[in-house]
Image: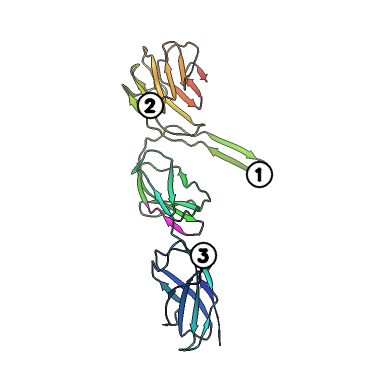
Amino acid sequence: MQFLPSNMQPEFISIDTTKDYVFTWQANGDSQYAYQLYIYLNSDNSLVYDSTKVISSTESHTLPAETLTNGVEYKWKLDVYKDDTNYIESEYVLFKTNSVPQVTLTVPSTINYQNYEFVASYTHPENIAPQKFKFILYNNNDEIIIDTGYIYSYNIKYKFTGLQNNTTYKVECIVVDQNNLSSTSGKQTFSVSYTVPDSIPDLNITPDNANGIINISWSDIIQLSGVSVGNYSFTTGKFGQGIYVEDNKSYIKFDYSEPSAFNLTFRVKLPNNFKGDFCVLGNDEFKIGYDGIRFYYECLGFKAGSNPVSLPTDFFLVGVKHLKVIIKTNNYTEIIG
């Protein structure tokens, strides 16, 4: 005795017609002698594919690529034969066809920071939205270092922190669309090379008495490479190694996009006759300088200065916060802005 076949796949899912696809089922009752598979357009019930009778006990059938068209809804049924003439006919099963998403991940050959945010671009021929994504970081031997797990968001990006200096990695982005079809960017190789920061992060420890735990968080340190204008050099002083700005036509420009809450700290030493800017952030949005009498801070046309002070003879620390500058030497601390 024959029973209706079960576990017919695909059922209520999308498949990509640009690739071969294996239709599967489970024959029930008498052993399968042969099968015949039919595929119809769901819109008008027209037959678009007929496998003809296949003498086989195998409960699967491979549909060749490009047999169907993506972006269409189909249905299929199956005749399962127990001998040359007797068969049982299955019910219809619906499925859709869609292209897989297209994911592009552009990665610099060399990354000059400990922390880097990778951003992937997503397109889909049928305009199917993304559902989830994940990034995977590999070492140079293709061993997984970090698998982010799937993240449900339309913003396909992730920041990896703590990348090791002088190390080669590979990164891959996998995206799944709303039809559960996935695609990968492939593994992109990059190297990491940066100047090791000599700063330590701010460590915050907050007791959570209600849950009996302690939350520990720390700031994200990134080493920025400044572009020099004019004459400068690296020398050693009381505060360690720093930048010596040698004349009033010299400064260091940092062109880097950071959130509005960024902090930047560096060491600088000025010659006794120095007057001018010694730090520029971005496209002249922030300036720190010395006019011979006082230190000043300029931001988008707003200019503020400290009280008159003598020029420090050794390195002093400069910390730049959003709309605020902290200048600290061995003699004083001044907050501007």
Contact check, label 3 and label 1, Cβ < 8 Å = no
Q: How crowded is mark 2: few (under 14 residues within 10 Å), some or many (20 or more)?
A: many
Main secondary structure along the magenta-highlighted residues: loop
Q: Classify 110 as above or below 85.
A: above
Numbered mark located on residue 297 in the image: none
The disc labelled 1 sits on which kind of residue?
Gly
Q: Name the residue under label 3.
A: 13
Quarter of the rendering containing residue 285: top left
Q: Name the residue under label 2.
A: 253
Q: What element carries label 2?
A: strand
Residue bounds of the magenta highlight: 180-187
Residue at horizontal 52 percent and vertical 33 percent from the top: 202
Q: Is mark 3 on a helix, strand or loop?
A: loop
Mark 3 → mark 1, Cα distance in angstroms: 46 Å
Q: Nearer the viewer, residue 117 or 284?
A: 284
Applied colour scheme: rainbow
Look at discs 3 and 2 and give the one toward the viewer.
Answer: 3
Q: Classify 166 as above or below 258.
A: below
Q: Nearer the viewer, residue 35 or 136?
A: 35
Mark 3 → mark 2, Cα distance in angstroms: 54 Å
N-terminal of the two: label 1 or label 2? 1
The disc labelled 2 sits on which kind of residue?
Lys
Numbered mark located on residue 212 in the image: 1
